Image: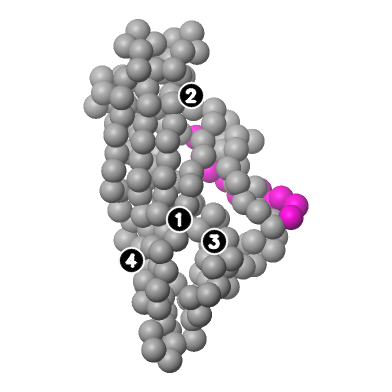
Amino acid sequence: MAFAVHVAAQSMERAARVGKRLRLLDVRMFEISGKIIDIRAADELQNVEEFSSRVGIELNEQVAAFNFHVDLTIKGVGGQPAVDVSLRAAALFEVLGGGPGGDVEVSEQGDFAAFGATTVQMIVFPYVRSAISELTMRLGCPPVTLDLLVLQEASGDSADVEPS
C-alpha cells in the first residue's frame, strides 16, 4: 500500500516557485539507529502500514537545508512491536540568486515549507527506504522495504503523509 502525501494545489504552486530557485547539492543521512524490541516478533516483520516524517528547515541566503526525522515501529509476528527505527536525513540546496543583492527572500517560509513537504520529501524518501531495509537486515531481521510515496491532491493548504 503506497504512502500518500496529501498536497493542496496551492502548496504545489508555492513549492514550484521555490524549486525554480534551488539546486540540489546533496542528500545526507546523519543518524540511523534501530533496536529490536521483541526478538521473537522480529523473526517475521510485517509491511509498514504507517509512515510519517517531520521536516525542519534551516535557511539562509546561500543554502537551504531540509532536515527530516523519521521514527517508526515495525511490527512483527502477531502484530507485536518488533523493531524501532530512528532516522535523521537532510537535503541540502544552493539558493540560486541568493546572497547580498539576490532575489530570494528568506522570509518566504511558507513556500519553503511547501517545497519541503512535497518535492524534498520525494527526493529523500528513496534514501530513507534504502536505509531502513539495510538496517533491518543488519539487525538480523528480514529486510523491510517501504512502499512507494505518491503525491495526491488534497483540499486546503496542507501536506501530510498517510497510507493510501
Measured in 3D between alpha carbons, the distance from the residue under mark 3 to the one under mark 1, in whole angstroms, is: 8 Å
Residue 141 magenta: no
Q: Which residue does the numbered mark 3 point to in the structure image?
A: 113
- Residue at 41% x, 82% y: name it: 98
Tag 2: residue type? Asn
Q: How many marks?
A: 4
Tag 3: residue type? Ala
Place of residue 54 in the rendered image (x, y in percent of width and height, measured from the top left): 48, 47
- Dot 4 or dot 2, earlier in sequence: 4
Measured in 3D between alpha carbons, the distance from the residue under mark 4 to the one under mark 1, in whole angstroms, is: 17 Å
Q: Main secondary structure of the magenta part?
A: strand
Residue 134: mark in rendering: none
- Residue at 50% x, 58% y: name it: 116
Is 105 left, or right, of 141 in this rendering?
right
Residue 56: mark in rendering: 1
- Residue at 39% x, 89% y: name it: 100
Q: Which corner quadrant holds the C terminus?
A: top right
Is 112 left, or right, of 131 in this rendering?
right
Q: Which residue does the numbered mark 4 point to in the structure image?
A: 25
- Dot 4 or dot 1, earlier in sequence: 4
Looking at the rendering, which quadrant does residue 102 occupy?
A: bottom left
- Dot 4 or dot 3, earlier in sequence: 4
- Residue at 29% x, 43% y: name it: 31
Residues in magenta, as a range:
147-156
Q: Residues within 10 Å of mark 3 (few under 14, many from 20)?
A: many
Place of residue 9 in the rendered image (x, y in percent of width and height, measured from the top left): 70, 60
Q: Which residue does the numbered mark 2 point to in the structure image?
A: 47
Nearer to us of marks 4 and 1 is 1
